[in-house]
Image: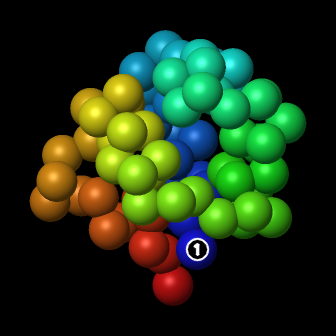
């Protein structure tokens, strides 16, 4: 389960939009929104690519993408 609040904050912090993230992942914006809101799951590849796009450090990866 993704930490939606933390990830949304990072998107804003990096001055990106959900559309920017969707384009970076090669998916439609509604699909990205569903993944961000834990309706659908990010694949590991998508999570890694998004982490790179948003400059999320490896040490923080699990805080964003594997929340309790």
Q: Is residue 41 left or right of residue 9?
A: right
The residue indicated by pointer 1 is: 1
Q: Nearer the viewer, residue 43 or 14?
A: 43
- Which residue does the image show at 42% across and 38% down from the upper left? 50
Q: Is residue 50 left or right of residue 19?
A: left
Q: Secondary structure at mark 1?
A: loop
**Image quarter for residue 25?**
top right
Q: Residue furthest right?
A: 30
**Image quarter for residue 26?**
top right
Q: Is residue 56 left or right of residue 54?
A: left
Q: Is the residue 14 above or below the residue 63 in the image?
A: above
Q: Is the residue 22 above or below the residue 47 in the image?
A: above
Q: Is residue 12 visible?
A: no
Residue 46 % position (x, y): 47, 47
Q: Is residue 38 visible?
A: yes
Render colour scheme = rainbow
- Which residue does the image show at 27% across and 42% down from the upper left? 56
- Which residue does the image show at 52% across and 39% down from the upper left? 9
Q: Is residue 24 left or right of residue 27?
A: left
């Amino acid at each position: 389960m993704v930490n939606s609040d933390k990830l949304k904050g990072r998107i804003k912090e990096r001055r990106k939009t959900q559309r920017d993230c969707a384009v970076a992942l090669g998916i439609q914006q509604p699909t990205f929104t569903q993944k961000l809101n834990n309706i659908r799951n990010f694949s590991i590849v998508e999570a890694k690519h998004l982490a790179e796009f948003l400059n999320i450090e490896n040490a923080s990866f699990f805080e964003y993408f594997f929340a309790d």
